[in-house]
Image: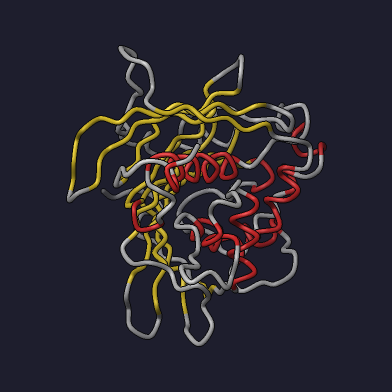
């Protein structure tokens, strides 16, 4: 598909992570003491949680806080307007895993290589920018993960661009009860912990950006909810084995505020692909709206970790 900005490649971005980064990420998304292979660096099966690469496009090689707005403005996409990163929210994420991540990047050079798949003018609501980001071993060329992302620039449309194609939908079944339900009570501190992974968007720490965007104050990172749900699915269905999560995606349907309770529901479909079963899921705010829709994962379903829960 062609169109404004399509095919533009951002400069390759070197990225790195330590075991400590992996431990922080696992703690921030709800891994439990039954999963020491995510939470204890001396565990013989110590592993990076498989959705961790979504944070690397924000983090890069930084070990300190990052100016989120400056980083987002650093490279412009040619042929399209300059969009304001102070009014951007997540649209959708799809992660595909090809190779297990090493426990740290030490001794190796990894890059995130990102290209634009589309820039879509949705009129008054805003503009969608869709990208593909590959985590690559720069020495061997091996691709470890691929993330397809869409970002929604609120109220930044009507510039004459293409409307974009219809997106694939994976609705949750309505004719039967979910196979798995799990919950999480967020707090005011939930986004303040998650942002330490490298996603320092002020929208998730200070009330002013959220007020300007019409949210009334701080909202929790969409990617926090996305990663929390991925953990719950792997914990309850995949035995907490990172090798059992092949693909994972969801659409960000509505904001989550600190203090909201998240309720995830998942349905096994029985549809298999190379030994992985398609699972549909959604996440709601308890008593309120769906906040993650279009949820789909490919999981080797072996039951909960250690047969508990």
Q: Residue at x 35, y 58 (%)?
A: 243
Is residue 69 shown above or below 188? below
Q: Is any atom of residue 268 visible in this view?
A: yes
Q: Where is residue 182 in the image (x, y as percent from the top left)?
A: 52, 30
Is residue 90 shown above or below 256? below
Q: Where is residue 23 in the image (x, y as percent from the top left)?
A: 62, 63
Q: Which of the colour schemes (rainbow, by chain, secondary structure, one colour) is used? A: secondary structure
Q: Which residue is drawn at 43% across and 68% down?
A: 101
Foreground residue among 181 and 189 = 181
Q: Residue at x 59, y 60 (%)?
A: 39
* In the image: residue 124, left or right of residue 112: right
Foreground residue among 220 and 227 = 227
Is residue 151 shown above or below 42? above
Q: Is any atom of residue 124 visible in this view?
A: no
* In the image: residue 270, left or right of residue 125: left
Is residue 153 shown above or below 264? below
* In the image: residue 207, left or right of residue 72: right
Rendered image quadrant of residue 242: bottom left
Q: Position of residue 268 (x, y in %)?
A: 30, 31
Rendered image quadrant of residue 141: bottom left
* In the image: residue 44, left or right of residue 99: right
Q: Where is residue 67 in the image (x, y as percent from the top left)?
A: 73, 61
Rendered image quadrant of residue 258: top right
Q: Residue at x 60, y 35 (%)?
A: 154
Kindly give the residue lying farthest to the top in the view shown.
175
The number of numbered discs placed on residues in the rendered structure image is: 0
Foreground residue among 19 and 219 = 19
Kindly give the residue lying farthest to the front in the view shown.
307
């Amino acid at each position: 598909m062609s169109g404004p900005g399509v095919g533009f490649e951002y400069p390759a971005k070197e990225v790195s992570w330590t075991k400590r980064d992996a431990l922080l990420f696992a703690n921030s998304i709800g891994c439990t003491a039954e999963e020491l292979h995510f939470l204890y660096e001396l565990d013989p099966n110590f592993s990076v949680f498989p959705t961790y690469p979504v944070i690397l496009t924000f983090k890069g090689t930084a070990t300190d806080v990052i100016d989120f707005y400056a980083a987002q403005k650093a490279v412009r996409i040619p042929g399209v307007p300059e969009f304001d990163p102070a009014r951007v929210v997540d649209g959708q994420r799809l992660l595909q895993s090809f190779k297990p991540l090493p426990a740290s990047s030490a001794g190796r050079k990894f890059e995130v290589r990102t290209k634009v798949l589309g820039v879509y003018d949705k009129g008054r609501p805003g503009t969608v920018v869709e990208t593909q980001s590959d985590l690559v071993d720069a020495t061997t060329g091996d691709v470890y993960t691929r993330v397809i992302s869409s970002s929604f620039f609120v109220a930044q449309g009507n510039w004459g661009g293409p409307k974009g194609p219809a997106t694939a939908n994976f609705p949750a079944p309505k004719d039967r009860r979910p196979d798995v339900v799990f919950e999480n009570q967020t707090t005011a501190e939930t986004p303040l912990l998650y942002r330490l992974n490298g996603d320092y968007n002020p929208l998730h720490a200070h009330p002013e950006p959220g007020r300007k965007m019409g949210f009334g104050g701080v909202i929790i990172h969409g990617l926090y909810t996305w990663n929390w749900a991925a953990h719950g699915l792997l914990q309850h269905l995949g035995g907490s084995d990172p090798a059992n999560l092949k693909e994972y995606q969801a659409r960000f349907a509505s904001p989550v505020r600190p203090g909201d309770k998240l309720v995830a529901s998942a349905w096994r479909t029985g549809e298999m692909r190379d030994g992985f079963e398609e699972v549909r899921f959604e996440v709601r705010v308890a008593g309120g709206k769906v906040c993650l829709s279009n949820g789909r994962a490919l999981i080797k379903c072996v039951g909960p970790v250690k047969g508990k829960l």
